[in-house]
Amino acid sequence: MIETGSYTEVLRREGLRNTKHRNSILETIEGSGKPVTAEEIFLNLKSKNISINLSSVYRALDILVFKEVVVKSTIADSSSAFFEINKREHKHNLICSGCKKIFPVDGCPLEEYEKLLQDKTGFDVTGHRLEIYGYCHECKEEKKYFSNE
């Protein structure tokens, strides 16, 4: 986990300049406690009177994703991408197709399958991502996913 105020070291380690915008973006992502969109980051920064364009947020995020400081996730049937700090944790998510909330899942059901694939094919598996889509308890209760109601 990146501690507040230690972004300078993270950026330096990745060969990136320490800028006010990059620090503010990282603070916003970390402070949100959940994956956020570029638009949410932009609006948060604007609410703090930080002068930045949405295109600058996207450019900064592209660099932070490329350097693996931030992780980018997309949700099926959504045009939005979500960003979170790369905590170097192996994790998977349940994603609600109704409200688009993301719920982390403990454990990994694919570790043995990865090894089996590696042994069978000789393919050197370096990682994987698993996102499971469905409807959360709240959306089921509110029947947000029934199109005829």
Image (tube, rainbow, N blue to C red):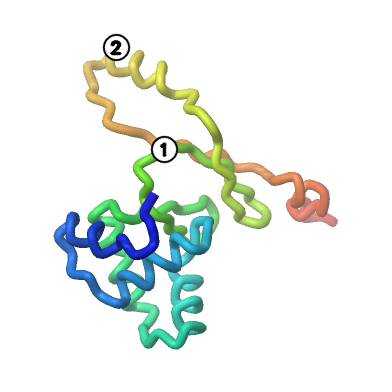
In the rendered picture of this protein, how many numbered marks are placed on residues? Answer: 2
Q: Quadrant location of residue 25? A: bottom left
Q: Determine the residue positioned at 26% across, 16% down.
A: 121
Q: Amino acid at mark 2?
A: Lys
Q: Is residue 49 left or right of residue 22?
A: right
Q: Is residue 17 left or right of residue 37?
A: left
Q: Quadrant location of residue 55? A: bottom left
Q: Amino acid at mark 1?
A: Arg
Q: Position of residue 13 (x, y in %)?
A: 18, 55
Q: Determine the residue positioned at 25% across, 64% down.
A: 8
- Name the foreground residue: 3 vs 41: 3
Residue 26 vertical position relative to residue 106 in the rendered view, above or below = below
In the picture, the disc for residue 129 is: 1
- Name the foreground residue: 132 vs 45: 45
In the picture, the disc for residue 71 is: none
Q: Determine the residue positioned at 43% across, 52% down.
A: 73
Q: Is residue 37 left or right of residue 97?
A: left
Sequence-wise first label, 2 or 1 = 2
Q: Residue lying furthest left in this view?
A: 15
In the picture, the disc for residue 120 is: 2
Q: Position of residue 3 (x, y in %)?
A: 38, 56
Quarter of the image that includes the C terminus = bottom right
